[in-house]
């Protein structure tokens, strides 16, 4: 009998409801239709594209069932963290709440930095915090940039020297 890699049954059902064109793949546009924030807004384009790119092993701009299953689990982990730290149950994460999340994740960043992230990712209503999609985007990009930093901070000093072009190359390969 054939062996199929394991996947989440819930993800399987979602995959088939989301795969609108029945191609056996999900692209960023289809993913966007499937994901909603607590305020019923769809996930933003950048977050959807970022996640498709993370789980798209073939660089085709889409994911199959197994890629989607991994992506689904990834979203659920962030959702759990989001809900755990949305202390006032507002459906969004404030600067203070984000600071607690980042501290828990091992980042030693100032509360001002967390506020700045919320302003940057919160859009027009930045004062009210960030929705799940922007939360995933902010945390993932932070992890990505931290990885770039760690690769260069060989002495673990917390400081790196890098040229402007190195910096841009890192940002482009990680974030775009």
Image (spheres, rainbow, N blue to C red):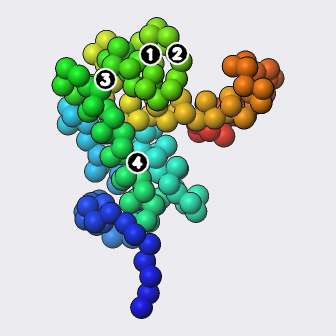
Q: Which residue is mark 3?
A: 93
Q: Residue 20 falls in which quadrant of the image?
A: bottom left
Judge whether 91 appears above or below 78 on screen.
above
Marks 2/3: CA distance?
17 Å
Instruction: State which quarter of the image contains the N terminus.
Output: bottom left
Q: Nearer the viewer, residue 154 or 82?
A: 154
| Disc 1 target residue | 114
Q: Is residue 85 above or below residue 53?
A: above
Residue 57's x, y, as percent? 56, 60
Q: Which residue is mark 4?
A: 74
Left or right of 101 in this view: 92: left
Question: For the point 32% across and 63% down, which residue is it?
Answer: 8
The percent position of residue 139, horizontal first and vertical second, equals: 46, 31
Task: Assess disc 1: are there few (<14), some (14-19) or many (≥20) residues with their C-alpha within 10 Å of its C-alpha.
Answer: many
Measure the C-alpha gap from mark 1 to mark 2. Answer: 8 Å
Which callout, 1 or 3, points at the residue further toward the start of the chain?
Answer: 3
Q: Residue at x 31, y 12 (%)?
A: 127
**Which residue sits furthest top?**
112
In terms of sequence position, does the residue under pointer 3 or pointer 4 come before the other? 4
Q: Which quadrant of the rendered structure holds the C terminus?
A: top right
Q: Are marks 1 and 2 in contact (CB under 8 Å)?
A: yes
Q: Secondary structure at mark 3?
A: loop
| Residue at the spot of label 2 | 109
Q: Residue at x 41, y 53 (%)?
A: 71
């Amino acid at each position: 009998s054939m062996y199929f890699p394991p996947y989440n049954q819930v993800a399987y059902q979602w995959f088939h409801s989301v795969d609108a064109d029945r191609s056996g793949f999900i692209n960023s546009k289809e993913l966007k239709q499937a994901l909603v924030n607590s305020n019923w807004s769809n996930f933003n384009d950048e977050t959807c594209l970022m996640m498709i790119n993370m789980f798209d092993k073939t660089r085709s701009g889409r994911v199959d069932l197994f890629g989607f299953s991994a992506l689904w689990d990834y979203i659920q982990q962030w959702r759990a963290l989001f809900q755990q730290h949305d202390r006032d149950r507002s459906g969004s994460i404030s600067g203070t709440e984000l600071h607690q999340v980042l501290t828990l994740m091992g980042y030693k960043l100032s509360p001002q930095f967390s506020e700045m992230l919320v302003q940057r990712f919160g859009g027009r209503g930045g004062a009210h915090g960030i929705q799940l999609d922007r939360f995933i985007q902010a945390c993932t990009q932070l992890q990505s940039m931290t990885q770039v930093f760690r690769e260069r901070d060989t002495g673990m000093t917390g400081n790196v020297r890098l040229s402007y072009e190195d910096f841009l190359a890192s940002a482009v390969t990680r974030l775009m």
